[in-house]
Image (spheres, rainbow, N blue to C red):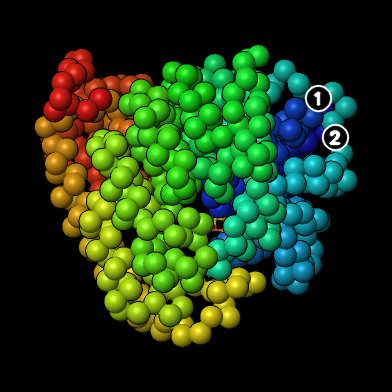
Amino acid sequence: MPHPPSAPPRIGFVSLGCPKALVDSEQILTRLRSEGYDTAPSYQDADLVIINTCGFIDAAVEESLEAIGEALADNGRVIVTGCLGAKADLVRERHPEVLAVTGPHDEAAVVDAVHAHLPKPHDPFLDLVPPQGIKLTPRHYAYLKISEGCNHSCRFCIIPSLRGGLVSRPLGDVMAEAERLVRAGVKEILIVSQDTSAFGADQRYRMAFVGGRPVKMSFPGLVSELGKLGVWVRLHYVYPYKGVEDVLPLLDIEGVLPYLDVPFQHADPRILAAMRRPAGRAHPSACVKAWRRARPDLVLRSTFIVGFPGETDAEFETLLRFVEDAGIDRLGAFAYSPVEGAAANALPNPVPEDVKQERLERLMAHQAILSAQRLRERIGRTYRVLIDARTDDGLVGRSYAEAPEIDGVVRVAGDARPGDFVDCEIVSADAHDLSGRLVPALIRGPQVIA
Ligand code: SF4
């Protein structure tokens, strides 16, 4: 629908891919809003569309190319950015009419392209930008990116070639952003990066300053500062380095939560070495046993790849046993698929497609049984739950043991608003979700988890 000539120019935005890309999208939108651009709810209402693409696996590349085609058909003026932007030739070959293609994490290049094709308004509405920036998540939780890039070279992954080596953000900047989010009403901060436990390694763990105090730029230094915010903080993309043990005592049910998202990807030592995984020599079983000894309340989420080239039946069985022995609480899994440009493409003995799919189904079925058992153990306990939504069927929320969007939920009978914390006694469970009822106040005791 055409809008009055005096109205600010309007940008349509499509954000694809992982939470790290979502943070990039938020930064681009924040910058554009601060310059006086407005956002449009549909292709038809926009003067120009930006697509932040994902290029992690071939299916994501295809989804991104289709989204670009759709925006071109419905709007016609499209700027492409994000991981797929690093393969500009591929984008231009399929969609030669795009206005510009810029690479990942390059806010300046996207904004320059917008200026070139949709000039800046003369009177920017600076006061319309909230201090915490533009967020694409619900008001009560937000992703916070602590670093960019990665120093590893996992054979199935092309992220280091797309995003470069590890660059940690100054700790003072990370904390200033976290404090802005808390002041804006955020109740849960989700820490994302390519490699969270390597925070500060590129800075040789130098001293940084937070509010005038010297603090070491390290994973424990970061967690200790985040623990002072007074809101939930959830750690994603934690690799099983030695430093993780130093962080366990800092985890707190009301601060940095005893929940770790650790992308193990496999458990068999030969496959981990073939994948060239970071911390590949630290056997996952030994790590998890030590962590669980230190923190019996620890909830572990992980992702796994089945059917990596050369994976034998016995190696797959090792993975199944690990998932059970380690008590992985939440699990995501993928069948290996070759990514253009990845070193793993040259490995011999690819696993046939039907075998990969069969292993994927077996792993997910195995996990569903284990997950149902673990969730049943939570019946009768009381948890603090952060409400995400109010639906016709009641409230939907999460305890410390569930991350938004990727884990299950806690359904609660009763009334509260999104962003409220409530105390909830669990009364039933299925393979992935829990149901509970509101209790008046949290009773603390050995059998009760807050
Ligand atoms: S750690 Fe491995 S999988 Fe993760 S971004 Fe780095 S190279 Fe890719």
Read off the residue under disc 2. 120
Q: Mark 2 is on which residue type?
A: Lys
- Location of residue 404 in the rendering, given as x and y in whole percent from the top left corner: 40, 40
Instruction: Look at 45% across and 38% down and name the residue there.
Output: 235
Res 405 seen here: no
Residue 167 x/y as whole percent: 68, 43
User: Disc 1 to disc 2, how far (Cα)?
Assistant: 8 Å
The percent position of residue 367, horizontal first and vertical second, equals: 25, 58
> What label sits on residue 349 in the rendered view?
none
At label 2, counting other C-alpha atoms closer than 10 Å, the crowd grade (few under 14, some 14-19, many 20 or more) is some
Mark 1–mark 2 CB contact (< 8 Å): yes
**Who's the residue at 72% across and 58% down the image?**
85
At 65% from the left and 58% from the top, the residue drawn is: 160
**In the visual, does 151 lie left or right of 125?**
left
Q: Vertical placement of 188 versus 356: above or below?
A: above
Q: Is residue 237 above or below residue 435?
A: below
The quarter of the image holding the C terminus is top left
Give the residue type at disc 1.
Pro
> Which quadrant of the figure shows ligand 1?
bottom right
Against 333, residue 336 (above or below) is below
Nearer to us in this view, 342 or 84: 342
In this view, 450 is above or below 87: above
Residue 84 lies in quadrant: bottom right
Residue named by callout 1? 124
SS for callout 2: loop
Q: Nearer the viewer, residue 449 or 132?
A: 449
User: Which quadrant holds residue 5?
Assistant: top right
Q: Position of residue 376 (x, y in %)?
A: 14, 44
Res. 161 image quadrant: bottom right
